[in-house]
Amino acid sequence: MQGFPLLTLLTFIPIFGMIIVLLLPKSAENNVKYTTLAVTSIQLVLAIVMILNFDYSAGGVFEVSSFQFIEKVAWIQIPDVAFLGTLKIDYFLGVDGLSAPLVLLSTIIFFIATFSSWTIKKSPKGYFAMYLLLNAATMGVFVSLDFFLFFVFWEVMLLPMYFLIGIWGGPRKEYAAIKFFIYTMLGGVFMLITMIGLYFSATEVLADGTQAYTFNLLALMNQNNYLTDGILSPSNPDNWRFMAYIGLFVAFAVKIPMFPFHTWLPDAHVEAPTPISVVLAGVLLKLGTYGILRISFPIFPDITRELMWYIGLFGVINIVYGALAAMAQKDYKKLIAYSSISHMGYVLLGMASLSSVGINGAIFQMFNHGTITAMLFLIVGIIYDRAHTRGLNDFGGLANQMPIYTGFVTVAFFAAVGLPGLSGWVSEALVFVGAFGVESIRTITMIGMLGILLGAGYMLWTLQRVYLGTLPEKWKELKDVDARELAMLVPLTIIVVVLGIFPSFVLNIMTTSVNSLVDFLSTTLN
Amino acid sequence: MSESSLISLAVTILLLPLVGFFIVLLFGKRFEHLYKLEVGIISVALLLSIYAGFVKLTSYVNDTIIAQFTWIDLGNVPTIGHLTVNLGIMIDNVTIIMLFVVTLISALVHYFSIAYMKGDIRFSRYFAYLGIFTFSMLGIVIADNLLMIYIFWELVGLSSYLLIGFWYEKKSASDAGMKAFLTNRIGDIGMFIGILILFTNYHTFSFTEIFNHISNGVVPFGSNGWLTAAGILVFMGAIGKSAQMPLHVWLPDAMEGPTPVSALIHAATMVAAGVYLVARIFAMLTADAMLVIAVVGAVTSIFAASIALTQNDIKKVLAYSTVSQLGYMVMALGVGAYTFAFFHLVTHAFFKGLLFLGSGSVIHSMHHEQDMRNMGGLKRKMPITYITFLIATLAISGIPFTSGFLSKDGLLAGTWAFGNLTGHYLIPIIGFTVALMTAFYMFRLVIMTFHGEPRNQHKYDHAHESPKLMTIPLIILASLSIFIFYTPNPVAPADGWFYNWVKAPQTVVPEEARFEFMKSESHEIEGTVNNDSHGGSGSGSATITHSEMYEHAMHAVHYPAMILSIILAGLGILFAFLMYHWKKIDADKLAEKLKPLYNLSYNKWYVDEIYSFLFIERLLDFSRFISWFDATIVDGIVNYSATFTRGVANITGWFDTYIVDGLVNFTAFVSGFVGLSFRKMQTGKVQTYIVYVVFSVIIILLVLRPF
Amino acid sequence: MVEVGLTHFLVVSAFLFAFGLYAIITRKNAILVLMGVELVLNAANINFVAFSRYSNYGLNGQLMALFVIVLAAAEAAIALAIVLNIYKTFGHVNVDEIDNLKE
C-alpha cells in the first residue's frame, strides 16, 4: 500500500462527490442519491482495505515511524515571515490504533445513514451536498496529524451540520441549529487559543536544518521540542499549561458532550432529521473523546495525570445524570439522546483510568456506542416516519403489530443496556475493569456502576411502554419494516452481535496503540 | 473417551440449544412444526449429558477437567505485562451433575409445554426462549471463571425476562419481567464489583487461578477484609438470582410467566444458579463472609416460609416455598455444609420442578384458575397429578424415603453442627422452625387443592386429568424424588454415591480468616474421624482438609437432627390436616385472632409496598427532578447566557446607535445646521450677490479706510 | 456763484452710479438691468473724464472713456441678443425666474 494516498481518498472522495452532486441538475434526485451512496460505499471499501492492510503491531500515537498510511506534504510553507521564522503547516495524515477503528466506524455509519437519508424530500441536492461535506470533514478530523489541519476540519464540520439541522430539522430547528453552532464554536475558540499557544511554544527542525514553530501533533508530544520560555512549555513556571489544558478540554467536552456542556445535544437530536441524528450520535460525539485521546492526553501528560480524578468524576456524572434524565423523558428521541450522554460517560471514565484496559474499553465503547446508538436512532426514525409522533406514552403493544421491527428493537435495547453477548457489554466491562483497577477513581467507579442498573431501568421501561402491552386502535395500520430499513438495521445488528462474541476483531486494532499510549503517559515527564 | 473429547461434548451440549434458539426464532413463524426441532435438540442434549456424566463419573471421578482459550488479548500492558482475558470450561462432578439436572428438567419442561402451551399465538417463540434459557444456564454450569459465569448470568436474566413477560399483553406480566431483570441487576452490580476486586488483584477470572493466588497468601489489596468483601459482593449476585432477602421480591411476581417456565427457571434451575455460584466460590469465603451468607439464607428461609403460610394463589405458595428452600441452601453453604447444600439443590430441583409442573397440570385443567379457594377434591379427577404431587410434597416436607428427606436432614444437621461449633444457635433454630412451617403450608396446599369437596363446582366439573405429555414428566420427576436414586440407605445419605461424588473444596482462605473449626491445627487435635481422603476437587496435594472437625460434629448430631426434623415435619402435617382437612381448628378464626400477624404474612410483610415507596417512587422523583434540573437549570444557564449575551448586545447596539453613531450624526447635524443657515444667502440670483458685493465693498472700504 | 469743480462732477457721477446700481439690483426686467449697467458705465466715464481734466495725466482719462463707450456698445449688443433669446425661450425676461439652462 506504499504510496497509495488511501487517507486522502477517504477524506476527499466525499468532496468530489459533493461537487458532482452540485453539478447535477435539481431534477436528478435519484442521481444525487446514488452518487452519495456510491461515495459512501467506496469509502467503506477503502476503510475495509485500510483495516485489512493494517499492521496490528505498530504502536503509533507518538512515533511517526509507527503510524500507517502516512501522507505528509508541506501545505503552507513561507520562509522568513516577520517574527515567526518559517511559517509551516503540513498536510499530514496517518492512522494508528486510536483512529483506525473510528475511521471504520465513520464509514459504516455514513454508509448506513445514506439509506436513512433516502426519504429526504426537501431539496435533496442541497442535503446530500451538505451530507458529503460533513462526511469529508469528519474523516479529516480522524486522520489529521497536524493540529492546524485538525482544526480546519473540526470547524468545517460545523457548517454542514448547522444547515442540516437548520434546514432539514423539526419544528424548533433554528433554535437547535444555532445552539449547536454557537456551543461548538465556543469550544472551537478555546481550541484555537490553545493551538496558537502550543504553536509558539514548540519548534521542529526542518529539512534544511533550521528551526521553526510547529503545528505537528507528534512534534508537540515530544517534550524536548519545547522552548524553555514558551508559554505552554512544561518548563514554564506559570500555570498556563493548566489553563490551556482546561480550555482544550472544554472544546472537546462540548462535543462529547460532557455535563454541564451537554444541553445542546437533546435539542439537536430532537430537531435533526433521523440520518443526521444517526451521524451525530454515531460519529460526531466520538470526535470529542477522540480529540482528548489524540491531543490532550499525549501533549499534556502531566496535567492529565493531575486531573484524571476529575475526568473520571465527570464521566460518572455523565453516566448517572444522563441515565436519570433519560428516565424522566416522555419523548422517545430525547430519551435516546440522554442515553447517549450516559453512554459517553463510560468513555470518559475509561479514559480517566489511564490504564490499558480502561482506554481499550473507552475506544471500544466509542465504536459500540456508535453502532448501537445509530440503531436506536434508526429505530426511533422508523416509528416516527409511520406514526408522526415520538411520545413514549402514545404507543403500546407494537410487538404484535411490527414483530420484526420489535426484534431489532430488543437487540438494540439490550445492547444499550449492556447485555453480555452483545458488543456494548464488552466495552462497558472493560471500562469498569480498567477504572476499578486504579485506586484513585475506584470509589467513583463503583458509583458509576449504578449506570448499569439505571440504564436497564429506562430502556426496559421504554420497551414496555412502546412495544409491550396492548396495541391502541389508532396504530393498527402501522407496517413492519421494509427492505430499505432492513438494509440499515441488519448490518448494525450483525456488528453488535459479532463484536459481542468476538470483540477481538476491533480490540486487536487498538491494543498495541493503547498500550504505547499508556506507556507514554506513565513515563513522560515522570 | 479422552478428557478433551469430554470438553467438546460439553461444548456441544452447550451450543445445541443456542442453535435451536436461532433457528426457531428466525423461522418459527414460517414453519409451524419447527418447535419439534427445539424439543429434539434438547432431548439430544439430555442424552449427551447423561453420557458425559457417565463417562466423567466412571473414568474421571476425581479429576477436574479444564480447557481455556483466550477471548481477548490486550497485548503487553504497561505495569502488568501480557494481559489476556481467558474463558474456559471446567468439568468436575458438580458440573456434570448440574448438566444432567438442567438438561433433564429442561427436556421435561419442553415436553410438558407442548401440551400446556398448545394454541398460544407465540408457540414457537416460546420454545426458542426455552432454548436460549437452557443455553445460558448450561453456560453458567460449565464455566471455569467468574467472567463467563457473569456473562451467562446476565443471559439467564435475559431469558428469564423474556419468559416472565411472555404474555406481554398483560401489563402485570411485563412489569414482572422488568422487575425480575432490574432486581437481578442490583445483585449483579455487587457481583461485578466483587469480580473486579478479584481481577484487579489477580488479573485473572479463573477460579483455580484465583484460589491458587489466595492459597499462596496473596489476598486482595493485602487485607483479609477485602477478601471477605469480595466474597460477600460476589454473593450479592446470588442474592439477586436466588431471590434472597432483600432482593427476593421479583420471584413471586415472576409467576406471571407460563407455569412450565416457573418450574424450569424459577424453581429448579435458574434460581439455583445463585447457590451454584456460592458453591463455586466456596473455597475463598472467609468466616465473616460465610456467616453473612448463612444469616442471609436463614432470614430468607423463615421470612419466605412465613409468607407462604397464608397465600391463596397456588403458584404464590410454591414461589415463596422456593424462596424459602433457596434460603436453606444458601444457609447450608454459609454454615459449611457444602455437600448437602448442593445435594438439596439437586433434589429440590426435581421435586420443586415437579410441584410446579403439577400445579401447571392443575391450572391447565381448571382453565387457568390459580386460586386454591376455588379448588378442592381434585384428587378424584386427576389421580396421577395428585399422587406425583403428593410425593413431591412429602419430599419437600422431609418425610423419610424421599430425596428431600436425605438432603434436608443432612442440611439441618449441618446447621446444628455449626451451632455447636460456633455458638450461633439461632441458625439451626430457624432451620428447624422452617422445616415445621414447610410441612404445614405444603400440606395446606395439597389439602386445599386435592382433598375435600370441590368449592367451585362449575370449574370442578370441567376439570380433567392432563394429557400424557404432561403426566409423564410428572411421573419421571416423582420417581426422581425417591431416595433410591441417591443412596441405598434411606436414612444415611453419606452411604450414597452422591456424597462421594461431591466433596467440599478445600478452603484457601488465610488461616486467620477462617472459622475456628476450619483451621489447620484442628486436624492435629481431632485426628481423622472420617476415613475419606476429601481431596479438594480444585487443587491437589491437600494435606489438611478443613471439614474434618465439622464432619465429626455433623455425625454427632446426625441422628438427633433426623429425629427432630421428622417430628417437626409430622407436626406440621398434623396441623395442616387439623386445620384444613378435619377442620378441628378453624383457620379463619385463628387468622382473626392473630390478625396483625396474619395481615403481615398475607401482604408479604409489605416489602413490595415499602420498596415501591422508598426506592422506586423516590428514584422516579429524583429522575424527574434531574430532568427538570437539566431543562431548567443547566439548560436555563445556557439559555440565560444566550439571553444575557443578547441583552449585552442590545445595550451595545443602543450605545452604538445613539452614543457612538450619535456623535457622528451630531457632527453632521452641526455642519448641516450651519450649512442650512448659510444656504439662504445662496439664492442663485445675481442681483442678491451684487448687493452682497456692494455691501462687502463698503464694509471693506470702511475697514480699510486709511484714516 | 460757486465754480463748477471736480467735486460736482464726482457727485453727479456718484448719483449716476447709485441709480445704475439700484436699477441692476432691483429691476426684474433684464432690459432695465442692462440699462442700469449702462448707467454704471457712464458714471465711470464721467469720473474718468473729470479726473483727467483736473489732473495732469494728459488725455488718458478721455481715452479710457472712449474705450468704455465702445465696450458698452458691444456689451449692449451681445446682452440684448441674449435677452432676446431668453425672451424667445421663456416668454419673458424676468431675471429671477431664469434659473434653468434648458427648458
Image: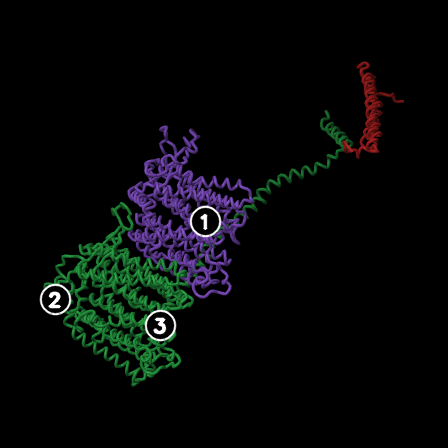
Chain colours: A purple, B green, C red
* Badge 1 element: helix
Query: In screen coordinates, is A274 left or right of B182?
Result: right
The x, y position of residue B405, in whole percent, is 21, 73
Q: Mark 1 lies on which chain?
A: A
Q: Nearer the viewer, mark 3 or mark 2?
A: 2
Q: Which amino acid does label 2 sit on?
A: Asn
**Quadrant in the picture for the C terminus of chain B:** top right
The x, y position of residue A448, in whole percent, is 35, 56
Residue ID for mark 2: B530
Q: Nearer the viewer, residue A353 or B106?
A: B106
Q: Which amino acid does label 1 sit on?
A: Ala
* Badge 3 element: helix
Which residue is rendered at x = 85% and y = 23% of the image? Answer: C8
Mark yes or no: residue A9 visible: yes
Which quadrant of the view contains residue B239?
A: bottom left
Q: How far apart are marks 3 and 1 (CA)?
A: 51 Å
Along the polypeptide, which appears first: circle 3 or circle 2? 2
